[in-house]
């Protein structure tokens, strides 16, 4: 069974929902690629650590940039609330730094 490290930016309602969903992939889908909750980033180092412990991630990131650059987090999911402009937003920056598989 091959694993892929998952990084999630944001640990609120949608971050939690996606962490739970990623954890359930093996039980729901017949696939050889299984998500592994690798790293989470909240709005501060304190909330990152809280989400890490609560949702079962291996590590907490201090910044979203740290998560995006992390080699073990092969898939990064941005679950922060939507911002108004794409180009100057976290979304735009994350998209431009994404490592496509």
Image (spheres, rainbow, N blue to C red):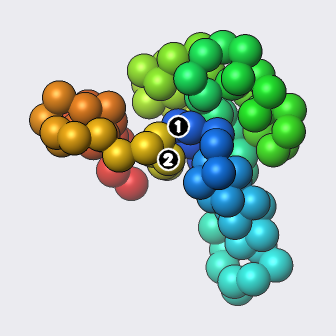
- Left/right of residue 98 with respect to residue 38 in the rendered view: left
Where's residue 33, x and y in %?
64, 67
Residue closest to the far front: 84
Q: Residue at x 75, y 34 (%)?
A: 51
Which part of the image, by quadrant, shows the C terminus?
bottom left
Where's residue 17, x and y in %?
67, 59
How many C-alpha atoms fall within 10 Å of the one at disc 2: few (<14), some, or many (≥20)?
many
Which part of the image, by quadrant, shows the N terminus?
bottom right
Is residue 97 at least partly visible in the picture?
no
* Occupied quadrant, residue 22: bottom right
**For the residues bearing labels 2 and 1, Cβ distance under 8 angstroms:** yes
Is residue 85 at least partly visible in the picture?
yes
For this rendering, which residue is in front, 88 or 27? 88
Which mark is drawn over residue 9? Answer: 1
- Left/right of residue 52 with respect to residue 69 in the rendered view: right
Residue 45 vertical placement versus 17 (above, below) = above
* Occupied quadrant, residue 53: top right
Q: Residue at x 71, y 72 (%)?
A: 25
Q: Going from the N terminus, do you reach mark 2 or mark 1 first?
A: 1
- Left/right of residue 80 with respect to residue 37 in the rendered view: left
- How far is mark 2 from mark 1, CA to CA? 6 Å
Q: Secondary structure at mark 2?
A: loop
Where's residue 86, x and y in %?
18, 41
Residue 6 vertical placement versus 54 (above, below) = below
For this rendering, which residue is in front, 78 or 81? 81
For this rendering, which residue is in front, 67 or 11? 11
* Occupied quadrant, residue 91: top left
Q: Would you name the residue on which mark 2 appears?
A: 79
User: How many marks overall?
Assistant: 2
């Amino acid at each position: 069974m091959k694993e892929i490290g998952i990084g999630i930016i944001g640990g609120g309602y949608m971050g939690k929902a996606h962490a739970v969903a990623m954890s359930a992939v093996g039980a729901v889908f017949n696939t050889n690629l299984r998500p592994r909750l690798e790293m989470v980033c909240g709005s501060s180092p304190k909330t990152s650590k809280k989400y890490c412990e609560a949702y079962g991630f291996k590590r907490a990131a201090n910044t979203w940039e740290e998560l995006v650059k992390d080699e073990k987090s092969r898939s990064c999911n941005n679950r922060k609330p939507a911002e108004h402009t794409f180009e100057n937003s976290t979304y735009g920056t994350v998209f431009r730094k994404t490592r496509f598989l």
